[in-house]
Image: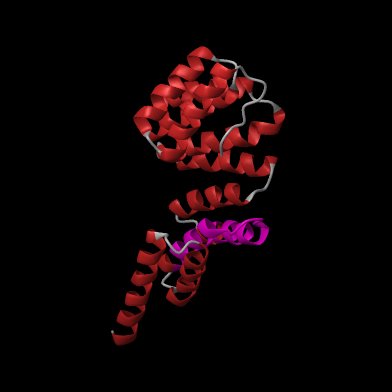
Amino acid sequence: MRGRLETTTKAERKLWVRLMRAWNDGNGASHFEVAAQYTKKYPDNVWGWVALADVLVHLANYKAAHRALSRAEKLATANIRRHICTQWGHLYRESFDLNRAERWYRRAVKYKTTTHGLIFLGAVLARQGRFPEAKRCHRLAVRLATSPPDEAYYNLGLILRAERRYANALECFEQEIKINPKYKLAREARKDVLSASRLRTNG
């Protein structure tokens, strides 16, 4: 999720492009510095605070991320509240408060049921060991997807692997690799379930 910038000056647009580049590249320190500059200069743009909160979560500075998201929430219009709910979910997921993360992801899905929202919800349910609910989320994400639901297949495969349903897990990982052949984690997971299947057969 990335914000859009509307009706800006040339200087703001230039700084925004730098911020989006750092965010997309996953450069944590650069992302933080540009986001801090941006929110200081343009405090009324909700997406600047979202970008700052996102990197603060990844830097495990959860208190500061909470403050940034609170600023974003005050500025958020109705059409982007779903995104803010998702960011709250990320914050609580990364700070290991899975119950709160679940509540925020459910709010996001209630605003608008999307593939990504369901995948996030399914993932946090799986981390709580609630596999049947998690599988329903990922399967619904696959059905609703308007673009290839690679992450849904991968996460569903992980749950099936944990349930020792290796053949079904393999199908999911194969679907994931078909969509995204370079996904290393899916390739490793496929190799793992193939090995586990052979061990079960020969055991």
137 drawn magenta? yes
Q: Is residue 194 above or below residue 132?
A: below
Q: Residue at x 45, y 40 (%)?
A: 93
- Residue 168 in the image: state x and y as whole percent: 49, 74
Depth order, front residue of 182/86: 182
In percent of width and height, residue 68 lies at: 49, 22
Identified at 66% across, 32% down, the residue is 80
* Quadrant housing residue 42: top right
* x and y percentages locating residue 157 in the rendered image: 47, 65
The location of residue 152, given as percent across then percent down, is 54, 58
The answer to whether 86 is drawn above or below residue 7 in the figure is below
Task: Return the residue found at the far top.
Answer: 41
User: Which one is in front, 47 or 130?
Assistant: 47
Region of the chain picked out in magenta, as a range = 134-160
Residue sitting nearer the eye, 42 or 10:
10
Q: Quadrant of residue 1?
A: top right
Q: Residue furthest bottom?
A: 202
Q: Image point 57% across, 58% down: which residue?
A: 149
